[in-house]
Image (tube, rainbow, N blue to C red):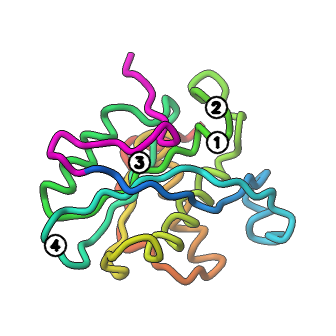
Amino acid sequence: MASIVYLHEGPVTLNNGITGESWQVQTANPVNFRQVISDPGTLEPIAIHAQNFLPPGVECPPVVIVVPGSAGLSPNHIEKAELFTNAGWAACLIDPFGARGVVTTAANQAQYSFAASAWDVVCTAEQLPGTCQIDVDRVGTQGHSRGGAAVLSALCMSKLIGVQQRIAGVYAAYPWCG
């Protein structure tokens, strides 16, 4: 089993030498999608950890938000950030688990809601342009399993509630469907 990576433990350095720039995403713990859409004033706030990886010599690169699945952030996600930066794209890794005190949701998906997973992605997309120089018209998301469900739901949610930052692309590999 791959080891879990917690972004609050410090900056991650990719094998290509790029070190992540740490920041916190101001997000929330919605109980369900109805709360986000109909009663956003009651959302319980939380800050999750994120790191941006910017390719050297590329001015305003496109960015991909990398969202972990049920097993949490792992070396596999770090490798994805390296692949993106090697291709001239920025990558933003988010750790929705650490701040919530969750190790894995594989055996118990109810430790935090799928609405919270999607909300993390929406909030990251909205706040990301304020943390680094990226092409705000080319913000993509990618996730596998629970992360795949999160990026699909985030796209739908952002359209429903009319958020400022548009998600330009979604890659959802085997999204968790319960």
Residue sitting at the far top: 1
Between 28 and 99, the one lying in front of the other is: 99
| Spatial CA span between label 4 and label 3 | 24 Å
The boundaries of the magenta stretch are 1-18
Q: Quadrant of residue 108?
A: top right
CA distance for labels 1 and 2: 8 Å
Q: Measured from the top left, where is residue 113 in percent x and y?
A: 70, 45
Per the model, the C-alpha gap separating discs 2 and 4 is 35 Å
| Membership of 139 in magenta stretch | no
Mark sitting earlier along the chain (3/1): 1
Q: Local crowd at mark 1 within 10 Å, few (<14), some, or many (≥20)?
A: some
Q: Amino acid at mark 3?
A: Gly
Distance from disc 3 to disc 2, alpha carbons, whole Å, reads: 18 Å
Residue named by callout 2: 102
Whether 125 is drawn above or below 92: the answer is below
Which of the two marks, 4 or 3, is nearer to us in this view?
4
Amino acid type indicated by mark 2: Val
Q: Position of residue 114 (x, y in %)?
A: 64, 47
Q: Of the residues under marks 2 and 4, which one precedes in the sequence?
A: 4
Q: Amino acid at mark 4?
A: Val
**Disc with the residue nearer the chain's start (3 vs 2):** 2
Q: Quadrant of the N terminus?
A: top left
- What mark, if any, has residue 99 been given in the picture? 1
- Give the secondary structure at mark 2: loop
Q: Looking at the image, is mark 4 or mark 3 earlier in the sequence?
A: 4
For label 4, the residue is 58
Extreme residue in the front direction: 10
